[in-house]
Amino acid sequence: MTGRSPQGPFPPTEEMLARPVPTALQVAQEEELHAAWRTRTGLRYLMSTNNTVIGKWYAATCLVFMLFSGVLALLMRIQLAFPGMNFLDADRFNQFFTMHGTGMMFLFAVPLFEAMAILLLPAFLGARDMPFPRLSAFGYWSFLIGGVFVLGSVLFDAAPSSGWFMYPPLATEAEGAGSDIWLLGLSFIEVASIAAAVELIVGVLKCRPPGMRVNMMPLYAWYVLVVGGMILFAFPPLIAGDLLFELERALDWPFFDPARGGEPLFWQHLFWIFGHPEVYIVFLPSIAIAAMIVPTVAQRPIVGYSWIVLSAVGTGFLSFGLWVHHMFTTGLPLISLGFFSAASEAVVIPTGIQIFVFLATLALGRVRMSLPMLWIAGALAIFTAGGLTGVMLAIAPFDWQVHDTYFIVAHLHYTLFGGMILPVMAGVYYFHPFFAKRMLSERLGKWAFWLIFGGFNLCFLPMHLTGLLGMPRRVFTYPGDIGWNTLNLISTIGAFTIAAGFAIFLWDLVRPGKPHLTNRNPWNAGTLEWTDQVRHRDWGVRSIPYVTSRYPLWDQPKLVARMDAGRYYLPDAPERLRETMVTSVIDARPTQVQRVTGDSWIPLLAAIFTGGCFILPIFHLYAPAAMSGVMAVGCILYWLWTATAQVPKAEMRKAGLGLKLPLYASGPEAVGWWAMWITMLADSTAFASLVFGFFFYWTARADFIPGDATHADAGLVALCAAGILLSWGLTYGARHLNRSAHATAARSALIAAPTLALGAGTALVLSVLELSPTSHVYPAIICALVIWTGAHIALGILMQFYCLAGTIFGKIDPNHDTDLWNVTLYWHFLLMTVAVTAAVIGLAPRLL
Amino acid sequence: MLRKAISPRFLRSPACLLLVLPLAACDGRQSVLNAAGQDSRQLLYLFIVMLAGAVVLWLGLNGLFLYVTRLRPQALKIHNVNWFLFGAGVLFPSVVIGALLAWGLSIMPAQRAAGDGLRIAVHAEEWWWRVEYWPKGATTPIVSANEIRFPAGSRSELHLSADTYIHSLWIPALGGKMDMIPGRTTVLTLHPDLEGFYRGQCAELCGASHALMAFQAVVMAPDDFARWLKDQAASAPPPTSPAATRGEALFRDEGCGACHTVRGTEFVGAVGPDLTHFASRGTLGAGNWQPTAENLMAWIAHADDLKPDVAMPAYDWLDPDQLADLAAYLKGLT
């Protein structure tokens, strides 16, 4: 390396930690920290990037979207209260249930995980902020714009109406912009979700406090890691599906049209490869909240830490092998049904273990019932009922009967209320004193609980029976003589009871005059977030502690006083810049002080233009969309250039307790490199889904590949592959040349590389010009692969130019080359993408 | 106050469902609990066993939770937590699930067994059902619509396909459902054994009138079925009353024959349901209304009011007398 390694003692000795910090120094340090971290006021508040601010915005927005989607459900329940009602017409009813599902899943359940993680994770880890605060802000603004746009469409009677699963051909053939709003609006939000997942994973891996080895992480952090990983592999297939879907909608490429070789079931596979893990993406973070509350309630450490961690990982893995249980009635062979039945049942084991870990912890501890625990108890009662009906449904033949009936509606709401809503409510009551510094009312909380819990069972328990009596889902009306009337009326009454409970909860949340917090740790919890002072300070932790226990507040009695005094790491901000600590992945040894990006308008601007790029095409405004896209790229380049991987004034910084840490890192030491790796895993998953498409058609359709098909020009495809190989070699070479101070050679390589890549990209496009993608799915999937690969080549070229500019303007020099490392990493993946594309479009048709 | 109320808790528990089930089982033409065939009875049995197990497990788990949090809030001792977790979290569910899978999956092949001879091709349209009967050895089908009849005591094969969108055919009293997918043919086999009238409905969202895509399923004694099928194969009877004769003329003049077939006449349209023996069917508008003269008149005049986005135009220019004549003609198509 470049001589930037940590210097000084680690770990600190007790003697070092016992040394007092002079009061004058403490005051001076607090002033520095305040200058660096203070939250702006007035309109500039919107420039905030601090995780506590973004986290609150995010969570509040999720809550609003949840209420909106909930109101849609209430309106639907009015329509269904009696047979033959005319409160909503068929089309509006279809819009409402589509938006209810879409809103609850995409705009509430998944983003709420991101919101809570962004709000809480740095506090759990004693970090000052997330590693990429502007990315959090960009993700939030994207989510807000996309969410308002998608949900708002319902007010203009223009919402999608084909169900939140958007099955073609119904959704591809649907008139109006509804389907496009769903596809493009949600793709935009999905990209933001993936960005959040990348950031959360890097946060857990690299931003833990010194001494917190992986086996000491709070369980919440483990769940964030698992769920973040699941998002990386679950969302990309849907994004790939969205791309194909929109190509069919906009350009009539027949991916799902059976008349031209397409296959409606392909979408169902892609959707549920996403959709089933999604259920666990929603469920696991809520279990994570329970895993933080249960030890506090029991006043003892969690029992079976490794059991619960392995179970969480196991659930994550299994969740990717279950998707076909949403397709048990599509006529798949019995052998597949048997396999997916068994896999679906297997998930009982890790889920059960997590519940039994809680039971054992409570049994061994000294339980203090509290309001959060009441919600957890309610969650358990509801979730186990939903889980047990899940065990029934996983048996394929039983599913043949009740699939797509109200039995399923009951089941999924039992799992989602028990597995998500109620634990989240427990979390809100538990963490409210942490993030709002006030206590919620015990009395109102109990009213809210019993109304929601009682109303829930009143609404959804009868639905099991409604389904068994034959009522299908998604019907806007039903005949009055089949025996469904009473049950539906009861469900409607129950739905409004739930709403009353939420109204009380909301009132408690917003009412003035709630008592201020007097004790920073009101539940006597053991984890780091409760070190946050009674008066919250924008900098988060006063100093980053050295941790030696899973429950430091219980096991390290002097920790809080020493943190407050600034005895630990990074107690100051001499350059008035925002910084947080980076530690090694496994054993959390300090490796670097990371300068994190601060408040700025750029995330908001970038999100507006990115939103324009996704939203304008819905109205066929292609030129403004393209301009908006260019502006978005410009914003992001400006942001990267001015705020990331800056060359520091001094290489090293005193980090406290005698430790000196580097301020710059490149390669695997740098958080950005990890972020690139993780992003490219997600990117490759989306690409793999497209390639899967090619082979899916090949196995599913006898007419794939058509005998008289025009193939991609093999010569040009080979030329493209060769050009990319050379360009990759030059990029890789440029990194080495730069490191060994051959600046001119490095720059020459960085000029030649994009030139070659440009030629290669052109060859790729030319190779398929003869194909007519509207005629059959074969040319269509080839062209889709070319679009995907071509866009990635274009991005690769942009990155090469960025590095070239970096070497010219001093952002990159032999000692500071993190951009080059990250770009080279991108190019490793790009090379792989091009190689696979070339093999599939150039070779496969000639061999198969 | 609320905490002390025990009985509402019972009402909310799945145990309550056990008491409700027998009450519910006796009504409902569209009920899973009203099993009228081998397949549905087997699945009902599976469900009842699973439900009983689920209730026991739910009570056990939540009882345990109540015990450790409320009844004995002081610390318990579990000598070996790992054994507890292994036993309760791995061993016990593995055994239960293993047994359930072995039994549950073993009943699948019988439910997909080949038919005993009768093949019924059902093609889903927006939002109605084109039905063709192919008795053993038949070279041409006997065409009907919006009603499916089965002979009791034998296994019939339903060959399912769809026109534009995905649909799903489901007769809860007879067995599980099967999706109908454009570009594919899926097969469902059913073995009804109790004669009677049942109701089937589309179970997959298929657009505006998904809720109104139903049909009547009739299970008949084999002899009755054979006789009925023979009648269905015949051409439509000619009009017998003056009103019906006027109705036939209107049918011709208004162009109804461009969409509907009435076999034995010049009406050979293939867009809408075959009406050759319309009056022999139990419902109007794909399982939704009684085929009374009043309902027929309302349907012809304003089909789109009754069934959103339906392809049949509203004949709102016809006066009540004309509508009555048309209804008389259709009521004569026995």
Image: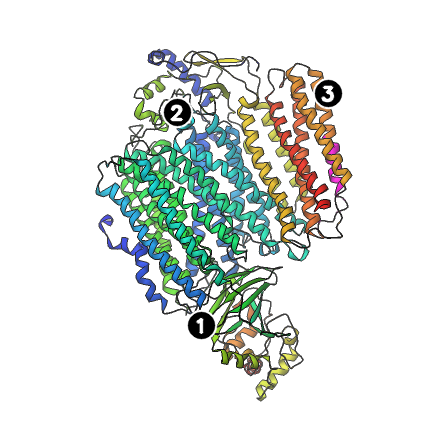
Q: Amino acid at mark 3?
A: Ser
A767 drawn magenta: yes
Q: Estimate the x, y position of residue A420 in percent, counting from the top left.
A: 40, 44
Q: Estimate the x, y position of residue A474 in percent, counting from the top left.
A: 48, 58
Q: Nearer the viewer, residue B85 or A472?
A: B85
Q: Which residue is mark 1?
A: B193
Left or right of residue A211: residue A782: right
> Local crowd at mark 2 within 10 Å, few (<14), some, or many (≥20)?
some
Q: Amino acid at mark 2?
A: Arg
Residue under disc 3 on the same chain as residue under disc 1: no
Q: Is residue A189 visible?
A: no
At horizontal 73% and vertical 20% (from top left) the residue drawn is A748
Occupied quadrant, residue A31: top left
Q: Magenta span covers which residues?
A: A757-773
Q: CA distance from mark 1 to mark 2?
A: 74 Å
Left or right of residue A109: residue A634: right
Whether residue A525 is situated above or below residue B144 in the rendered picture: above
Q: Are marks 3 and 1 in contact (CB under 8 Å)?
A: no
Foreground tag (3 vs 1): 1
Q: Is residue A583 visible?
A: yes
Q: Which residue is mark 2?
A: A537
Whether residue A416 is situated above or below residue A589 in the rendered picture: below
Question: Quadrant of the image for the N terminus of chain A?
Answer: top right
Q: Which mark is residue A748?
A: 3
A578 drawn magenta: no
| Element under disc 3 | helix
Q: Chain of mark 1?
A: B
| Element under disc 2 | loop
Secondary structure of the magenta portion, mostly?
helix
Q: Amino acid at mark 1?
A: Asp
Q: Chain of mark 2?
A: A
